[in-house]
Amino acid sequence: MADYFAGDPRTNRERMLAGDLYIADDPDSAREAQRAVRLANDYLAAYARDAAAARPILAELIGNLGEGAEVKPPLFVDYGTRISIGARTFVNYNLTALDVAPITIGEDCQIGPNVQLLTPTHPLEPQPRRDKLEAARPITIGDNVWIGGGATILPGVAVGENSIVGAGAVVTKDVPANTVVVGNPARVARSL
């Protein structure tokens, strides 16, 4: 394997947090990922007994949880700590939010079931992929956005405020504010 990090004294976690290429073998990242799995499972179990009593577990898992935000479990995250969910946002079942890079969800959003927010990226060249290099780009969702069930938002995408992402859409590029996008890849269907 090539020495991709010659002269770079940072750990792979430090590279990841900086948004640079890294290899996902950092022990601190592994501990954080295990913590996220444990908290997500604890949240699911507690929610089944008492949704209100489960909220402190969710608040411990998510980096920033706005007032009145609701997330129905199960929830799948890499770390959880790099996710911000705005006030009064509702997230339905089975959100997968791979927060290698930050994921910011605005206020008053509605997110359908089985939505995927995927920040990781991988090199196009075969050898760096074989060598397990990866990186990530943030996802930003503005205020008052509706994302239909089964939609996927890919790395580096920003969805502008008051927009609608249709069910099953695969969003590969930024969505302007006040826009409806549908399809795979998502395309503008109309302005609002």
Image: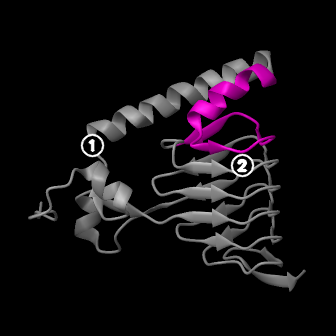
Percent across and percent down for residue 121 are 43, 65
Q: Amino acid at mark 1?
A: Asp
Which quadrant is home to the C terminus?
Answer: bottom right
Instruction: Identify whether 102 is placed above or below 155.
Output: above
Is residue 40 positioned above or below 188 on the image? above
Residue 33 counted in the magenta span: no
- Asked which quadrant contains residue 123, the reply is bottom left
Magenta residue span: 51-77
Label 2 Cα neighbours within 10 Å, binned few <14 / some 14-19 / many ≥20: many
* Horizontal arrangement in the rendering, residue 153 relative to residue 163 (left or right): left
In this figure, which residue is indicated by the disc labeled 2? 114
Residue farthest to the top? Answer: 49
- Judging from the image, what secondary structure is the residue with disc 2 in? loop
110 on left or right of 43: right
Q: SS of the residue at dot 1?
A: loop
Where is 178 relative to 101, above or below? below
Callout 2, which amino acid? Asn
Q: Residue at x 62, y 50 (%)?
A: 84
**Residue 23 seen from this side:** no
Separation (CA) of disc 2 from disc 1: 29 Å
The quadrant the N terminus occupies is: bottom left
Q: Please give the name of the residue rendered at 47% of the width and 66% of the height, measured from the top-left corner.
A: 137
Query: Is 96 left, or right, of 73 in this rendering?
Result: left
Left or right: residue 15 compared with residue 98 = left
Q: Is residue 55 above or below residue 114?
A: above
Task: Read off the residue under disc 1.
Answer: 26
Is residue 76 part of the magenta span, yes or no? yes
**In x, y percent, where is residue 127?**
22, 68
Q: Nearer the viewer, residue 21 or 128?
A: 21
Q: Earlier in the sequence, mark 2 or mark 1?
A: 1
Dividing the picture into quarters, in which one does residue 110 lie?
bottom right
In the rendered image, residue 148, in percent from the top left (x then y), is placed at: 81, 59
